[in-house]
Image: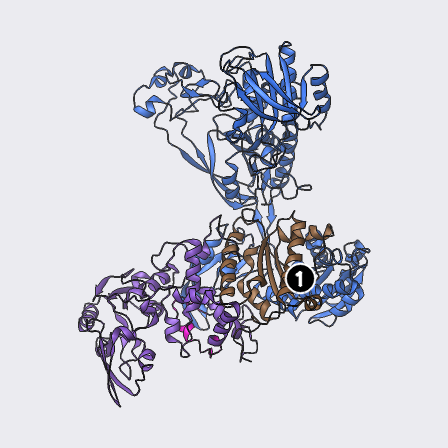
Chain colours: A brown, B blue, C purple
Amino acid sequence: MPMNSTESFAPKIVAFCCNWCSYAGADLAGSSRLAYPADVKIIKVPCSCRVNPMFILRAFEKGADGVIICGCHPGDCHYSTGNYYARRRMTLLFSMLEYIGIEKDRVRVEWVSAAEAVKFSETMNSFVLQIKNLGENVRLGDLRCKS
Amino acid sequence: MQRIGVFVCHCGSNIAATVDVKRVALAMLSENGVVFADDYQYMCSESGQLKIAQAVKEHNLTGLVICSCSPRMHEATFRKAAEKAGINPYMVEIANIREQCSWIHKDIEQATQKAIILARAAVAKVNLNSPLIAGKSPVKKRALVIGGGIAGIQTALDIADAGFEVDIVEKTPSIGGKMSQLDKTFPTLDCSACILTPKMVDCAAHEKITIFTYSEVENVSGFVGNFTVDIKKKARYVDSAKCTGCGLCQEKCPSKKALSEFNCGLSNRSAIYTPFAQAVPNVPVIDPLQCIKLKTGKCGLCEKVCAANAIDYTQKDEIITREYGAIVVATGFDVINLDNYDEYAYSQSKDVITSLELERIMNAAGPTKGHLERMSDGKAPKNIVFVQCVGSRCADNKGKSYCSKICCMYTAKHAMLIRDKYPDVNVSVFYIDVRTPGKNFDEFYRRAVEEYGVNYIKGQVGKVTPEPDGSLTVHGVDLIDGRQVKISADMVVLAAAIEPNASVRQLATQLTASIDTNNFLTEAHPKLRPVESPTAGVFLSGVCQGPKDIPETVSQAGAAAAKVIGLLAKNELTTNPCTAHSDELLCNGCSACANVCPYGAISYQDKEVNDHGIRETRRIAMVNTALCQGCGACTVTCPSGAMDLNGFSNKQIIAEVDAICR
Amino acid sequence: MQELKNRIKQLMEENVAQRALGWKKGEFGYDAQAAFFESTDELDDFVYNGFCGANLSKYMIEACKKEGRTIICLKPCDTYSFNQLLKEHRIQREKAYIIGVGCKGTLDISKIKANGIEGIVDIEGADMFSSENLLKIKTVYGDHELAYSDALLERCNCCKGKEHMIFDEIIGESADTVSADRFEQIEKIEQLTSIEKFEFFRNELSKCIRCNACRNACPACNCRKCVFDSDKFDSAQKANSDSFEEKMFHIIRAFHVAGRCTDCGECSRVCPQNIPLHLFNRKFIKDINMLYGDFSAGSNCEENCPLTSYSFDDAEPGKI
């Protein structure tokens, strides 16, 4: 992707953040004024284990260019085990996406604690850059390419 | 069809300086379901809330979207405001346009666009919200305190004094904890036992307190107000009801080779033992690994000499189940294992000891009856070197990254006490920094230096070498003089780091309480809720939450007790209505959801259903809403989508996704 | 086959079971279908040969709603699906009398036709219990011969094993049919570039006509109501007004059966468009085996599904 087009391309990025760690981390990033691009829109979920693969696929189908899921660090889940299940689900889903030829860099899971405002902001900055480098998502919009 | 009102908060200039709030409000008017939109300076203020109430009345609103600060800040405020205005509190959604927008973006156009999208997502969600009604659950008016050290003792006493029943579960044979092992306490130098023993006795005598020593928490189920805990009472082989505590059994026991845990392994104890003379309860236990009778079937001497017939070799571990409204964790600490610090020759020389071992040596009831002696040859040491920060404040993974907090003070105490009692002994202390914040702490340290002539050397010790003549050569560096120092000592005392008791990991899992990377229990908020765990109904007392000295531990213990009392004083609790529920027509009864539920909230029932005219009995998942905490793990596991979560339903989240990607 | 038929008849006559679940001969010699046999008279149409590919496990859900007990014929690989259904409480063990039937591999009619054989009237030599490896194919244009082993379904070339995981009795012997590595195809696809992969799957999936045959045949797809048929996710549609289902159906279906799929291969077998749908499921199986230890859904009823369990040191998403 040539550089000049990454400049003008504003990707659509959906971030699922768990209520207890990552959403709080995002809040702290906000109150610490740690900027990250406005392309990122956060959806609050109680736990990373609430993120259904269907939500991710739905986002892509509706035109998202990247989806990131943030949860408590393994071992720190508010519900004690939720992120362990999320980790397996997402590992398999991401592997499947790569297998069918969807750039795996369009999806990411990151564990961000309530204290890790810097990590949150850095994660979002690097993810947006990553998506900008990939450019617009055309492949997962319609795998069957019918219409 | 909802009638939604959108309220955009300026938050003074916090939002309004970066987000064009009027444009956000205007944009929302064209969103599905929105019948009213307005902006205001401070939505959370009384007049802001009044605005909400007025709009609800005038426009017959059924749902609200507040575009403001984080829901973690004011969601509760706006839910209450909605309720006052006559709307179900769960018909409110917050678009976080401050933390997630105005505070992190500078460009007004960009921030406004983003605020509009965030608000749009909240509107899309509210369109699918349905009123939720919080349930009530009763509160069992009894507390469990896990750990019988000074933290647990103080918490239990404070709760009991408020009139509530308290159980203490302590895994060793006696309550008292680490404090009972200490000789003197800083900064007043009063004897530890003198101030602790009365509290132990108070505990035992208190009519509201039940002490389970030599017991462990086996299983925890339930939730705030309604915990059910299985406590394993390990076989004591002594009938507590009959034992008079005469001590004859311990005297006569022929197996005396076990290392005394209480004396840090510096002396021996019998197979039947009470850890120390002031133990509460004063009832011995038989160590099954040491007892000749239990190992070989021969002996039985203690049984013969016991006039009270209290010995019972047939006793078995016993599980008792009790119900509690609140649980306090007070599991305390241990000194770290020093295997990683072989340079200090701890494993090579008996005269390299930890500070806790020194406490026992200095104690009149200790292995040397309070005489300062070398453990190798019983000689009086003439040169003692203290090494600070052994395993604390480590930059590498060898030790702990944190400061153990108590070492500077107790080392000053040790140095001072030694110089006071044995003025001819030279005492040197190697330190990185001396940290003495605390009432009368720095004065205490200065006395050690100024009045007692303790030789403080800023610098670290690189190596301790045991010499053939029995002395120890301490190789260190003096950072202030910038030179290598070599001190010939005959005793080296290591201020070893403290770490949470190893049992806490498993306990945290049982309680679904979180722990940090150092195994300290996490508080609900590091500043504002320091004695509560994020798990409702679980409270933290003492070092299990972070390194603390005695006064701090006692104050935290009192604070935890106050929180528990506040909880137990209630007759019922309002439960979170954002729980999972299963659609009986879609449920396959496959059990996948129950497998992932961390709370055991899902069970199955054979239920007769009417599926579009077909009546049949089906195996159907049922959620116990009192147990469900609303994580949503089950909803994703369920292939048919029968399981859904109130407040975060599949449709609601999909609506948000769609609104963001539109 | 006669032995099997006689035994079923006997069991029904002795009232051990009230009906049988087996295969019934079709119009041609190669289109046997799953069928309930409610009386011994109906057994005249019973057949068991290489064209009885249908995995009957899923029909047990229906059978469990009927009075009494049902004899069910299960090939070795079908027993995995049966176990999986038991584990998910979708069927009851006591409602079934399981005859584990020997299997020497099931036949793929499209493979036969691919040899240029048209106008088939009858096929001889498809019997499961004969050791003959020759298919004699009568067509309106004359006779053809083909080795039985050359006409096997792909799934039989990488057969899971010839042992029945659950049964009440076994009739007939099974023969080894393995001639390929189960994950070979998956590995080949994994080697492709991202664009090649995408083009491969796009090409395959664009053939899909959403007939739902895969879903209907799949024993793991046993939901009372599929998410794509309910309004729970906003994913169902009338006349495809929303394209989400259209676009994501196969990925979501594969994910829903991940950790539960026994790799029975019914999805690919029944697909009228010959889409190799098992490539999705088998990819999940391969990943699960690699990441979480060897797991074979339905090999027993106790083991927890890899997606409803975890370990502390699992791989991180996207980092494998």
Spot occupied by residue B202 in the image (x, y as percentages of width and height): 57, 24
Tag 1 subunit: A
How busy is the neighbourhood of tag 1: few (under 14 within 10 Å), some, or many (20 plus)?
many
Spot occupied by residue B254 in the image (x, y as percentages of width and height): 37, 16
Q: Which residues are magenta?
A: C205-226
Q: Residue at x 58, y 59 (%)?
A: A108
Residue hosting label 1: A41
Specify the amino acid type for callout 1.
Answer: Lys
Q: Is residue B281 above or below residue C42?
A: above
Spot occupied by residue A122 in the image (x, y as percentages of width and height): 66, 53
Residue A24 in view = no
Residue extending farthest to the bottom is C141
Residue extending farthest to the front is B483
Question: Which of the 4 quarters of the picture holds residue B649?
Answer: bottom right
Give SS at disc 1: strand
Q: Residue at x 46, y 65 (%)?
A: C191
Question: Which of the 4 quarters of the picture holds residue C26?
Answer: bottom left
Q: Is residue A29 above or below residue B489?
A: below
Question: Which of the 4 quarters of the picture holds residue B578?
Answer: bottom right
Which residue is more in the foreground, B609 or A19? A19
Query: What secondary structure do most residues of the magenta stretch adopt?
Result: loop
- Dividing the image into 4 quarters, which one contains the N terminus of chain B? bottom right
Q: Is residue B409 a member of the stretch shown in magenta?
A: no
Q: Judge left or right: residue B360 versus residue B26.
A: left
